[in-house]
Image (cartoon, rainbow, N blue to C red):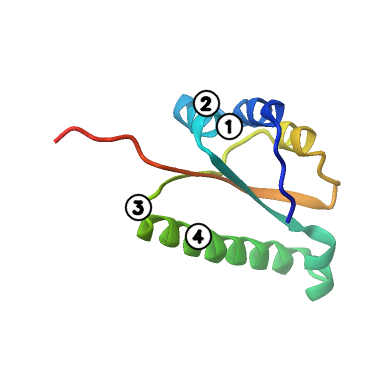
Amino acid sequence: MQLQEQKDLQQALAEAPYYADLNKQAIAIAPLKIILAVNNLKALKVTPLMENAIRFIRLEAGHATQNLLLQATALKLGTCTITSFQLGTVYEALHLPENQRPIYLITIGYPKKTRN
């Protein structure tokens, strides 16, 4: 886990999501962004079959993200989970090594007030 604190990083990550302007806006304004990434080399040590490694990675990433979102919701925080994004942009912004694969971009913050 690494803490990154840079305005340029926020702007670069805001360009990562495909298509949905709301996802880009969520990254641009949310006070907390979590990028869930997996170490591919460690995953392949658990099982040498790439198919199994990918399946395990996705399952565990989903479990971890679900728990994170449930806890954020319990704290009355708003979340946005982004799974469709430009890998190259995320790698470049975070200076990730090639063996680290981003799975989810997650934003957490206080939701906007809604009208009744």
Front-lying residue, 109 or 51:
109
Q: Which quarter of the rendering shows the C terminus?
A: top left
Relative placement, left or right, of 3 versus 77 is right
Q: Name the residue under label 3.
A: 76
Marks 4 and 1, how far apart in space?
Answer: 20 Å
> Badges 4 and 1: C-beta atoms under 8 Å apart?
no
Mark 1 residue element: loop
Mark 4 residue element: helix
Residue 84: quadrant of the picture? top right
Marks 1 and 2, how far apart in space?
Answer: 7 Å
Marks 1 and 3, how far apart in space?
Answer: 25 Å
Q: Which of marks 4 and 1 is in front?
A: 4
Residue 72: quadrant of the picture? bottom left
Q: Which of marks 1 and 3 is in front?
A: 3
Q: Total marks drawn?
A: 4
Q: What residue type is labelled 3?
A: Lys
Q: Which quarter of the rendering shows the N terminus?
A: bottom right
Earlier-in-chain disc, 2 versus 3 = 2
Mark 2 residue element: loop
Q: Name the residue under label 1.
A: 17
Relative placement, left or right, of 27 versus 49 is left
Neighbor class of circle 4 (other Cα within 10 Å; few <14, some 14-19, many 20+) is: some
Q: Mark 4 points at which residue?
A: 68
Neighbor class of circle 1 (other Cα within 10 Å; few <14, some 14-19, many 20+) is: many
